[in-house]
Image: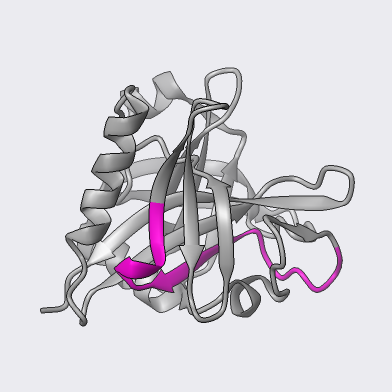
């Protein structure tokens, strides 16, 4: 039996939600399958920081090594201290140190060097921003760090639940900028899509700020 804390809640087609979380002891990432629906997440009150008791087995896939067939799935509470402990434990400074390959574009070519499909990227507030893609009516994320320059990444998180795109981007950027002290950090959960024509595209699943004043 495992206990995970929910870190990622991203919207899929057909009212489905992709949930991922980190084991509170080992930091191992789990993506329980089959996907839940929005209605099930609301009924079970599943949010970022929710604790899940889980049993089942890993599907042992390449790239998407987190895929986990669940046989037991119980929501047992919420714990934001454990959430941030798990983020700190799994944080890496670059795409390459997390996935195993350096990113030269918004995707990684699928091959055996890719170690996983979700990582926690540790950043400073000045390295990340949200912008509006007016053509596609979506939020995009730009990341510029010492190691990576990634622009126009899709933002897949269910939060914040704001319909107006400009207000949503402003909310995200205000949240980021509220963690601008030199001791503060931003944790961006970066995910890879299923391969399409040999490419796994990156998206930002969640953004967390931690104050260390």
Q: In the image, is 123 to the left or to the right of 210?
A: right
Q: Residue at x 40, y 77 (%)?
A: 89
Q: In the image, is 172 to the left or to the right of 191?
A: left
> From this viewpoint, is residue 42 visible?
yes
Q: Which picture quadrant has residue 91? A: bottom left
Looking at the picture, tell me which residue is in the foreground, 81 or 142.
Answer: 142
**Is 108 inside the magenta-drawn segment?**
no
Of the 4 image quadrants, the one containing the C terminus is: bottom left
Q: Is residue 187 above or below residue 96?
A: above
Looking at the picture, tell me which residue is in the foreground, 88 or 176.
Answer: 176
Q: Is residue 140 above or below residue 23?
A: above
Q: Residue at x 53, y 58 (%)?
A: 190
Q: Which picture quadrant has residue 96? A: bottom right
Q: In the image, is 129 to the left or to the right of 66?
A: left
Residue at the limit of the structure toward the front, as seen here: 134
Query: x and y percent of residue 155 in the render?
Result: 48, 43
**Is 127 inside the magenta-drawn segment?**
yes
Counting labels gives 0
> From this viewpoint, is residue 6 visible?
no
Looking at the picture, tell me which residue is in the foreground, 56 or 107.
Answer: 107
Q: Residue at x 70, y 74 (%)?
A: 102
Q: Residue at x 40, y 61 (%)?
A: 128
Q: In the image, is 134 to the left or to the right of 81?
A: right
Query: x and y percent of residue 154 in the render?
Result: 55, 43
Provide the residue span drawn in magenta: 111-129
Query: x and y percent of residue 103 in the render?
Result: 69, 68
Q: Which picture quadrant has residue 62? A: bottom right
Query: x and y percent of residue 116 in the render?
Result: 67, 65
């Amino acid at each position: 039996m495992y206990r995970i804390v929910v870190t990622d809640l991203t919207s899929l087609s057909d009212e489905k939600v992709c949930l991922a979380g980190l084991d509170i002891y080992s930091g191992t990432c789990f993506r329980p399958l089959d996907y839940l629906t929005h209605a099930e997440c609301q009924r079970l009150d599943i949010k970022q920081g929710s604790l899940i008791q889980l049993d089942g087995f890993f599907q042992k896939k390449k790239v998407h090594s987190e895929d986990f067939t669940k046989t037991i799935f119980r929501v047992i509470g919420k714990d934001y201290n454990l959430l941030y402990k798990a983020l700190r434990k799994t944080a890496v400074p670059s795409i390459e140190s997390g996935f195993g390959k350096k990113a030269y574009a918004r995707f990684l070519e699928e091959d055996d060097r890719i170690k996983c499909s979700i990582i926690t990227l540790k950043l400073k507030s000045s390295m990340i921003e949200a912008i509006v893609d007016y053509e596609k009516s979506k939020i995009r994320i730009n990341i510029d760090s010492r190691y990576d320059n990634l622009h126009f990444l899709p933002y897949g998180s269910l939060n914040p639940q704001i319909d107006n795109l400009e207000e949503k981007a402003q909310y995200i950027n205000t949240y980021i900028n509220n963690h601008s002290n030199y001791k503060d950090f931003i944790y961006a959960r970066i995910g890879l899509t299923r391969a399409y024509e040999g490419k796994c595209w990156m998206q930002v699943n969640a953004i967390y700020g931690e104050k260390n004043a």
